[in-house]
Image: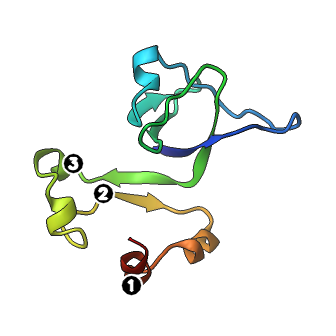
Amino acid sequence: MLSISTKLDHIHSDTEIADVVSLSFDLRQKSRIRVTLQSGVEAALYMQRGTILRGGDFLQADSGEIIEVNNELQNSPQLLNTDPENTGWYMKIKIDNTEELTNLMNFNQYKETF
């Protein structure tokens, strides 16, 4: 499943549009939804909370692909807080560009920031 989490402010005129998704007004107001692109590819939209998509907005897919989602969180969402490093994981991602890993925070950097 493709992961999409970036809304672009604008695109250059020579940018190739790879796929299209059509959403009802109600769905455009949700920040986390599962969609099917026009090509038939399933995608997960993970937009920043409060983001409202409008007709004509451009989105950018993340590098990589979601290969597994932890369904146990549906029944026990508290696992995200009580056991995030073991049973509370959110998703597993197959990464296309491993250089992007250098931009991630380690545990101590995360604690200092948040």
Compute the Cα span from label 1 to label 2. Answer: 20 Å
- Label 3 or label 2, whichever lies nearer to me, is 2
Q: Nearer the viewer, mark 1 or mark 2?
A: 1
Gap between marks 1 and 3 measured at Cα: 28 Å
Where is residue 89? Give x, y as percent: 27, 63
Residue 59 sits in which quadrant?
top right
| Residue under numbered circle 1 | 108
Q: Residue furthest bottom?
A: 108
From this view, report whether residue 85 is shown above or below residue 38. below
Q: Which residue is mark 3?
A: 71
The residue at which mark 2 appears reads as: 90
Q: Secondary structure at mark 3?
A: loop
Quarter of the image with the N terminus is top left
The image's colouring method is: rainbow
Q: Answer with mark 1 or mark 3, whichever residue precedes in sequence.
A: 3
Horizontal relation, residue 98 to residue 34: left or right: right
Please tell me whether mark 1 sits on a helix, a strand or a loop: helix
Q: Residue at coordinates 66% horizontally, 22% vertically from top-left?
A: 56
Left or right: 85 as drawn, with respect to 13: left
The one nearer the camera, 10 or 96, is 10
